[in-house]
Image (cartoon, rainbow, N blue to C red):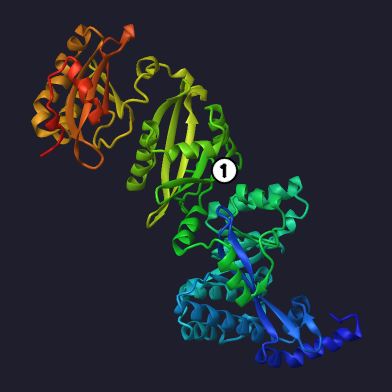
Amino acid sequence: MSLRKPKDKELESYIESHIEEAIEKEWIQVYLQTNIRGLSKRVCGAEALSRWIDPVYGMISPGEFIPVLEKKRKIHLLDRYVMETICRELGERRRRGQFIVPISMNFSRLDFDVPTLLQEMEEIMERNSLPRNYVHIEITESAVMENEAYMKDTVRELHTLGYKVWMDDFGSGYSSLNLLKEFEFDTFKIDMRFLSDMGKKSLIIISSILYMAKEIGIHTVAEGVETEEQYRFLKVAGCERMQGYYFARPEAMKEWFAHTKESCEMETEEDCYLYDEIGFVNIISPVPFDLERSDSSPSIHGFETGQPVAVMSEMDGVLKHLNFTKPYRKNLLELGYEGTHQFQDLLNDRSILFTDKMRDIMDLARKSGRIEAMDFLSGGRHCQFQTRLVASKGNKNIFLVRLDILSNIRRFQKNKEFQEALSPLYTVYDMVFVFDLKENLLNPVYVNEIYEGVHESSNLRGEIEKFVENKVYPKDKEACWQFLNPDTMAKRVESAEKDFILAYFRSKNRKNEYVWKRFVLIRSHERSKQDRVIFGIHTLNMDKVSMMHKEDQQIIQEEDFFDR
């Protein structure tokens, strides 16, 4: 393509003939533009850019010198210089114990025509003793399409060497979706021209791209973010990283490091690991708790969700909402909270029994790696809290949580078989079972403690025997069995003045320690279910001792509360 003006030809000739001198004399300077984490607004990296500040022409823009260098096939000189400069600075700062962040660098399609490119990259990294995770390689769609088979091998080799490979300007070409299918990119950068007007179509396209990225396991970066409106939309839609003038303009590299250290919160390596794990959690998916994706049997879901789900971080024991769906906030408002902030404050106050139980469930999920749940009553509504650990590093944890108001769910409304009998127990007891003495059945209604091996069973007697043997303190086993003996249970409960009987025994908690618990058997009030008994267990504390003396039960000495 011919240049339009004579001065352009003059500039083109100057750029071609002076590139080596510009590099040697550092007329070309490396600039950095901040990369922030969408959920936390912390600095998580930067993109390397170049500026040519010439003694003759002044500032020569990248839009002028990069096309010329590509046309004259000298772009590899610039890109190698940028990588050398970045790695030298990162290596020196790392040796001095100063903070560094991962830097992404743009590579032209012509760079990959240089046979020694990867060897030169490795020499630069080795010379500066820099781990590969601090350098991310950005490749444009046009670079990949130039020689697809060769580039596929190159991307694979870059991965083998330990580099992360990003696809730049996703959506700017015609083959972006096909490339995602054929290439193993770690991240793609979204062309923010989609959001130039914030119109409905643009928002749908961006949301769909971000949804797709999470489902196929690719991280996302949005560049060119310029407004608060764009940032808020991208955060809710699940974009992991962002950059643009809304956050920061490009700065010369040394000034960038000095300014960022003074004025910004930095992401640690632990934070980076955790947030990268969160990046694959799709809270708008119909199955957000399904963290294991199977390539052999993929599940395809629609984009709509009505699930009340949130992502929460736990740092040094303090919980914080990172993101949440509209149904989640709606449920909190319906339960009487002013919003997510008030519920968050409640969860951080462990002096409240309800909060302590909920935090115990989160701790259980952290240890088990499975979905854990508890039921509770709030404002007369039956609710359920579910949680699952997404990632953990040191003293930092990331949880996925779900808060359902079961009373609003039609299938729950229809199932009223046990509600009247169980309603007093939901917020008090650690676990509730239903014993069907006639049919010899055991049905766990809900369990907020670890009682391994206690499942729905048609062998009620056998399950009770196993529970007493494995969970109850040796000195209490005989008395506990007499209390739970299904042969005499119906008669004892039926003859109780208050339709229930109590006893106190020591049994194991989740830490495998023996603690005092209150066992209660309650007769069912359903006429057709007279052989059905509700069984609940509640952990006691020392404040309950005086109550135990007043109840119709054997006197227990205070020293018996300690396992010697």
134 lies above or below 469: below
Q: Locate the N terminus by quadrant.
A: bottom right
169 lies above or below 505: below
Q: Locate the C terminus by quadrant.
A: top left
405 lies above or below 261: above
Rendered location of residue 162, percent (x, y): 47, 73
Q: Which residue is painted at 79% across and 83% down in the image?
A: 58
Nearer to us in this view, 223 or 55: 55
Mark 1 Cα shell of 10 Å, populated few (<14), some (14-19), many (≥20)? many
Q: Which residue is painted at 32% across and 9% down in the image?
A: 525
Rendered location of residue 474, percent (x, y): 10, 33
Q: Which residue is mark 1?
A: 284
57 lies above or below 237: below
Q: Is residue 138 visible?
A: no
Residue lying furthest right: 5
Say what amino acid the circle numbered 1 marks.
Ile
Rendered location of residue 489, percent (x, y): 18, 15
Quadrant position of residue 552: top left
Q: Is residue 441 visible?
A: yes
Judge from the rendering whether residue 506 lies leftward or rightward of residue 148; answer left or right: left
